[in-house]
Amino acid sequence: MIICDTNILSTFARVGVLKLLFKLFPKQEFFIPKAVYEEIMEAIRHGAAFLHSVLALVDSGQIHLLTLTFEEARDKTTLPQSFGSGELEGVIICARRSSILLTNDKRVRNYCQEHGIEVYDLVLLLRTLWRKKVVSRKVVQKIVNDIERLERLVFKNKSDIFRKYL
C-alpha cells in the first residue's frame, strides 16, 4: 500500500509525470488520506489547475481515499504538530497499516526513518525511476530540470539522484 502526500502528487502532476509513480510501484495500490484530498481541493480552488490530474486518478479509482480509524485519529496527537494535516494522516496510516509513504517533506522523511516507516522522498523516487529502469537517466534529468523550473525547487543533493551507488 502506497500513501501519497500532497507535495509529491503536486510535483509529479505539475511536470506531467504522475503515471510514473504507478510504473515504479506496479503491484501496489495507491491511497491518499482525506486530509491530502482536502489540501488538493484547496489548491485547485486557489488556481492549481494541474492538480485536476490527481482528481482524475481518484475518480478513476487508481488512487483511493482513506479515512482514519478512530484509533488513528486519536494517535495523530502523538505526532509532531509541525506536520501539516495531510502529513499527519499519511504518517499515522503508514505507521498503523505498515504502508509506504511518498513525501518530499524533510521533517516527515526524517521522522519516518527514525520510526521504521518506509518512506520515499523526491530524490529517492527520481533515483529509483532510472535505477529500476522505469525510465532512462536522460528522462529523469529532464524531469529534474522541469521540477526545478516549474516548481522553483532547488535540489541540494541533486548528485544523489544520479550517483551509481549510495
Image (cartoon, grey):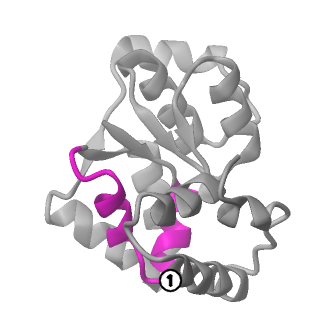
| Between 157 and 147, the one nearer to me in the picture | 157
Q: Is residue 82 magenta?
A: no
| Between 158 and 93, the one nearer to me in the picture | 158
Horizontal side of 69 relative to 81 (left or right) equals left
The vertical placement of 29 against 59, above or below, is above
Picture quadrant where residue 17 is located: bottom left
Q: Amino acid at mark 1?
A: Val
The vertical placement of 123 against 116, above or below, is below
The residue furthest left is: 60
Q: Secondary structure at mark 1?
A: helix
Q: Position of residue 157 (x, y in %)?
A: 81, 60
Figure disc tally? 1
The residue furthest front is: 164
Residue visible at 67% across and 63% down in the picture:
161
Q: Which residues are magenta?
A: 6-27
Residue visible at 37% across and 67% down in the picture:
134
Residue visible at 65% across and 58% down in the picture:
164
Horizontal side of 84 relative to 52 (left or right) equals right
Name the magenta segment's main secondary structure. helix
Q: Position of residue 121 (x, y in %)?
A: 61, 50
Horizontal side of 103 relative to 73 (left or right) equals right
Q: Position of residue 19 (x, y in %)?
A: 32, 71
Q: Is residue 26 magenta?
A: yes
Q: According to the image, label 1 marks what residue?
A: 139
Q: Position of residue 13 (x, y in %)?
A: 45, 75
Picture quadrant where residue 156 is located: bottom right
